[in-house]
Amino acid sequence: MIFLVVYIGAIAVLFLFVVMMFNIQIAEIHEEVLRYLPVSGIIGLIFWWEMFFILDNETIPLLPTHRNTTSLRYMVYAEKVQSWTNLETLGNLLYTHYFVWFLVSSLILLVAMIGAIVLTMHRTTRVKRQDIFRKKCLGFSKDYKKEGGRP
């Protein structure tokens, strides 16, 4: 469960930084943008097809089909699997059989998140910045001299 919370939080933070980097401004949809609509529709359909293909119980190699399926161990396990939903089956696979790859992908996601933070916090040297504390101190000393006090 903790893996899932970490992943959702990391993806939300990455999405936030991507939106910040794009500097999105509201604009009207032009005819040039509409010509990309068929390509994006095809990509979207391929994405949905892949998601349904992955989440289908038949495509997940959980049950051994070409092995000895008459053993008692397999029969008990098969009864439990048949009552699982697609999400439970996927979670069981990720957290038991593929947990190493799951952790490696979380480290890659962590590096990507840190990279997004570093890219958005880049400071340029060409921008003039004000030192407010120094400016206030100079203003105080000028005001103090105008009143007739000693510096």
Image: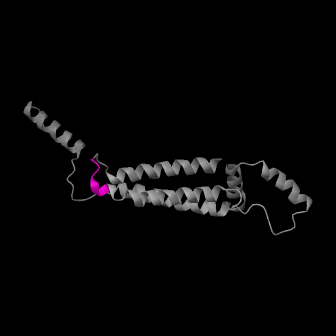
Residue in the picture at 35% in, 54% down: 21
Q: Report x, y in % for residue 19.
A: 38, 50
Q: Report x, y in % for residue 94.
A: 67, 57
On whether residue 105 falls in the magenta region, the answer is: no
Is residue 29 depicted above or below 112 in this figure?
above
Q: Report x, y in % for residue 119.
A: 37, 58
Q: Report x, y in % for residue 42.
A: 46, 60
Is the C terminus in the top left, top right, bottom left or bottom right quadrant?
Answer: top left
Q: Which residues are magenta?
A: 27-33
- Give the mark count: 0
Residue in the picture at 22% in, 50% down: 129
Q: Residue furthest top?
A: 147
Is 119 situated left or right of 145 in this image?
Answer: right
- Say which of 22 and 83 sits in front: 83
Q: Residue furthest bottom?
A: 66
Render colour scheme: one colour
Is residue 149 depicted above or below 114 in this figure?
above
Residue in the picture at 56% in, 51% down: 7
On whether residue 29 falls in the magenta region, the answer is: yes
The image quarter containing residue 117 is: bottom left
Residue in the picture at 23% in, 43% down: 132
- Say which of 31 and 131 sits in front: 31
Is 16 situated left or right of 27 in this image?
Answer: right
Is residue 139 depicted above or below 106 in this figure?
above
